């Protein structure tokens, strides 16, 4: 069942994104004193007293974008207004009633949908009387709030709940897999999202840095619901000078942490750069299943074999040699469904569990085939192994001396697990711990 959509609207700099983060209970949208930060539609599921809805943040109505994207931002706002079930019209108590507020009010009234008028930045009761002038907008009752001072949040949620359509009683369908789409600027991430959804969900432009927030987008494929997280294009660290870019970098990293599978995008016509290496290093450090996605392959298919690009990736990222590689054209949708299906396979691999018995039999065979090298004239002993968690698959091996297990032998065991278990294309975490008296005393192998 589709959740009702509650859309936050208003002129620039009235605190829409702050209100969105406040209701969501976490910092999702970028908040900055500079007008026009929000461009794409930000979404978040909200539950209040058993009723669920999708909260949507939009760009400021009437913004003149510095990158000449005003028309694209207006399109995103118009789509949100058209699809809305409830409108949360935000005004600024401190700056008072502005001509642009009246323009927004006329537009809101013409739509004819339930409206909750929110007088934001009413930090204390002394500001409440100042808000009375907004009744002139003709948008009904008003809720005076302060996202900064955490004032009247419950009252606002109840006002939204009272005008929600009845289908809000059911929770939304849980996404089966979260996909983070990361990469440097202009590699085609937002175009990929739009093709995936068959609609202009994300603003696409030749202007670098068009996407500024990490935007969650639900989509359905073959009857299954997935969540795609479009992230801002990342610049080299020394080039991150503005707050917007600083937050964008951290949002890309947070999206990697949130994801079940990461799609690392590359432009087929560009060489791998320092930003790509930083992102892949972060993916590796967080043990996230990853697919290398070589986009815009239509530009290179006549000039370079796929094997050459694949070798280029393998040589550049040896620690991610297990990651599969996909060649797609995001603009036309070529190979996109295969990519999503492969991502699903990685998602299932990362959730696999192997029983202690089969795992220890595999370890015994590995030790017999290739015993660990001597350490201080003695052969290290591995007593038993167990998988302690999934996502990522995490295996603990109990031994007599963890530091006696050399890095090369750890890589050997990792290769055995990857070849013989259902973890062929996902990261595996290995921990070597000293056996204690409370551990099982059966020995897998050793002298």
Image (cartoon, rainbow, N blue to C red):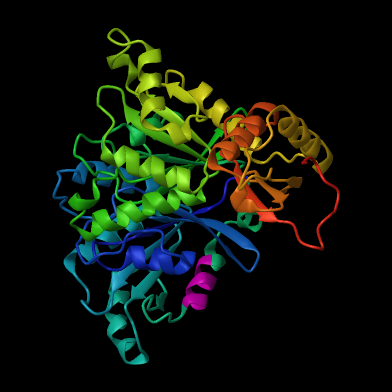
Left/right placement of residue 73 relative to residue 401 reads: left
The front one of 164 and 317 is 317
Using the rendered image of the protein, determine whether residue 118 is visible from the camera's viewpoint: yes
Q: From this view, report whether residue 168 is shown above or below residue 394.
A: below
Q: Position of residue 28 (x, y in %)?
A: 41, 59
Q: From this view, report whether residue 144 is shown above or below residue 414.
A: below
Residue at the limit of the structure toward the front, as seen here: 377
Q: Quadrant of the C terminus?
A: top right
Residue at the limit of the structure toward the top, as seen here: 302
The front one of 149 and 408 is 408
Q: Position of residue 380 (x, y in %)?
A: 68, 45
**Quadrant of the image occupied by residue 279:** top left
Using the rendered image of the protein, determine whether residue 423 is visible from the camera's viewpoint: no
**Quadrant of the image occupied by residue 16:** bottom left
Please report the residue visible at 30 percent of the width from the left and 81 percent of the height from the top. 131
The front one of 394 and 346 is 394
Please report the residue visible at 72 percent of the width from the left and 27 percent of the height from the top. 369
Helix, strand or loop: magenta stretch: helix
Please report the residue visible at 43 percent of the width from the left and 82 percent of the height from the top. 151
Q: Magenta segment range?
A: 153-160
């Amino acid at each position: 069942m589709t959740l009702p959509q509650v859309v936050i609207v208003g002129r620039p700099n009235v605190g829409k994104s702050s209100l969105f983060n406040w209701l969501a209970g976490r910092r999702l949208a970028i908040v900055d004193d500079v007008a026009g930060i929000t461009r794409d539609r930000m979404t978040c599921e909200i539950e209040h007293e058993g009723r669920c809805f999708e909260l949507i943040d939009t760009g400021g109505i009437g913004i003149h974008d510095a990158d000449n994207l005003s028309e694209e931002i207006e399109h995103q706002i118009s789509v949100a207004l058209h699809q809305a079930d409830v409108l949360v019209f935000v005004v600024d108590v401190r700056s008072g009633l502005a001509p642009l507020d009246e323009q927004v009010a006329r537009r809101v009234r013409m739509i004819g949908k339930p409206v909750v008028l929110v007088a934001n930045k009413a930090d204390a009761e002394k500001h409440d009387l100042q808000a009375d002038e907004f009744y002139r907008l003709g948008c009904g009752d008003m809720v005076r709030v302060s996202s900064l001072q955490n004032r009247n949040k419950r009252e606002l949620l109840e006002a939204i709940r009272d005008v929600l359509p009845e289908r809000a009683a059911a929770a939304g369908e849980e996404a089966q897999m979260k996909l983070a789409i990361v990469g440097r600027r202009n590699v085609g991430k937002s175009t990929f999202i739009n093709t995936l959804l068959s609609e202009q969900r994300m603003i696409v432009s030749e202007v670098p840095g068009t996407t500024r927030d990490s935007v969650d987008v639900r989509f359905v494929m073959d009857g299954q619901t997935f969540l795609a997280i479009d992230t801002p294009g990342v610049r080299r660290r020394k080039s991150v000078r503005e707050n917007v870019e600083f937050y964008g970098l951290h949002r890309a990293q947070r999206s990697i942490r949130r994801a079940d599978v990461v799609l690392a995008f590359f432009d087929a016509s560009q060489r791998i750069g320092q930003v790509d290496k930083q992102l892949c290093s972060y993916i590796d450090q967080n043990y996230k299943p990853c697919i290398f996605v070589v986009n815009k392959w239509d530009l290179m298919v006549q000039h370079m074999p796929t094997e050459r690009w694949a070798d280029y990736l393998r040589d550049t990222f040896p620690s991610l040699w297990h990651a599969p590689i996909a060649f797609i054209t995001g603009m036309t949708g070529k190979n996109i469904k295969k990519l999503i299906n492969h991502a699903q396979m990685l998602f299932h691999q990362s959730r696999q569990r192997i029983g202690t018995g089969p795992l220890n039999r595999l370890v015994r065979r590995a030790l017999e085939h290739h015993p660990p090298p001597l350490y201080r004239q003695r052969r290290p002993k591995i007593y038993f192994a167990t998988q302690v968690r999934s996502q990522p698959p995490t295996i603990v091996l109990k031994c007599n001396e963890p530091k006696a297990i050399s890095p090369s032998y750890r890589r050997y065991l990792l290769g055995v697990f990857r070849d013989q278990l259902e973890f062929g294309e996902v990261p595996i975490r290995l921990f070597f711990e000293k056996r204690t008296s409370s551990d099982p005393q059966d020995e897998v192998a050793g002298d």
